[in-house]
Image: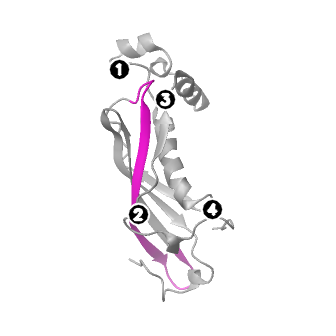
Amino acid sequence: MTRRIDDPVWQEVEEGEELAPLAFPLSVYRLVMAAGANRDFNSIHHNSDYARVSGAPEIYANNFLLQGMWERLVRDRIGLGSVIRRLSGFRMRIFNTVGDTVTVRGRVRRKWLEGGEGVLEGFVEFEIWSENAGGVSVGPGTMVATMPLAAGAAHRRDGLAGEG
């Protein structure tokens, strides 16, 4: 893993750490552009009448947009030099419709080291969820990422706090 000079390292992450929440207002423009960008041309994401006939209260955010919000939350903490390895538990519970503001929240659930003789990798698991005025709208779920270790730490286990 190549570390960018300004990226955080695994040792700087603390278990239980709360991530700074991010708010995403959902305008018609944002929903239409997001659906078009990921080629989700289902009318429920851009046609209010169609969305209501299908049982939704209004046009709503699709999975890719909502997953992108989760990535943005985690990426703000881990930087661009880290790798997101897994997303799980992503479940849409209630609609995120035009006019809502989706707030994405999370915390560091745990961190650990993997590897043997030679190179170690620092893993971090984040618990994440999305909220709107109706409560938790997506999740909770988890994302697991690998982060660079501080210089010289990738080849030894001694002195690495948080090893699990």
**Label 4 neighbour load within 10 Å: few <14, some 14-19, many 20+:** some
Count every numbered label the image shows and give the total. Answer: 4
Whether residue 115 is in magenta: the answer is: yes
Residue stretch rendered in magenta on the structure: 96-121
Name the N-terminal-most of marks 1 and 3. Answer: 3
Q: Residue furthest right?
A: 5
> N-terminal of the two: label 2 or label 1?
2
Indicate the position of residue 117 as horizontal and vertical percent values: 53, 85
Q: Which residue lies under the disc numbered 3?
A: 26
Q: Which residue is mark 1?
A: 56
According to the picture, the residue beneath numbered tag 4 turns out to be 81
What secondary structure is marked by label 2? loop
Q: Quadrant of residue 138?
A: top left
Which is more N-terminal, label 1 or label 4?
1
* Nearest to N terminus: mark 2 or mark 4: 2
Looking at the picture, does residue 48 appear above or below residue 65? above
Number of the front mark, 1 or 3 = 3
Could you tell me how far apart the alpha carbons at marks 4 and 1 are, in whole angstroms?
A: 39 Å
Secondary structure at badge 3 equals loop
Q: Are marks 4 and 1 in contact (CB under 8 Å)?
A: no
Q: Nearer the viewer, residue 45 or 27?
A: 27
Q: Is residue 58 left or right of residue 24?
A: left
Measured in 3D between alpha carbons, the distance from the residue under mark 1 to the one under mark 3, in whole angstroms, is 15 Å
**Res. 52 image quadrant:** top left
Query: Which comes before the other along the chain, label 3 or label 4?
Result: 3
Which residue is at the front of the view, 2 or 79?
Answer: 79
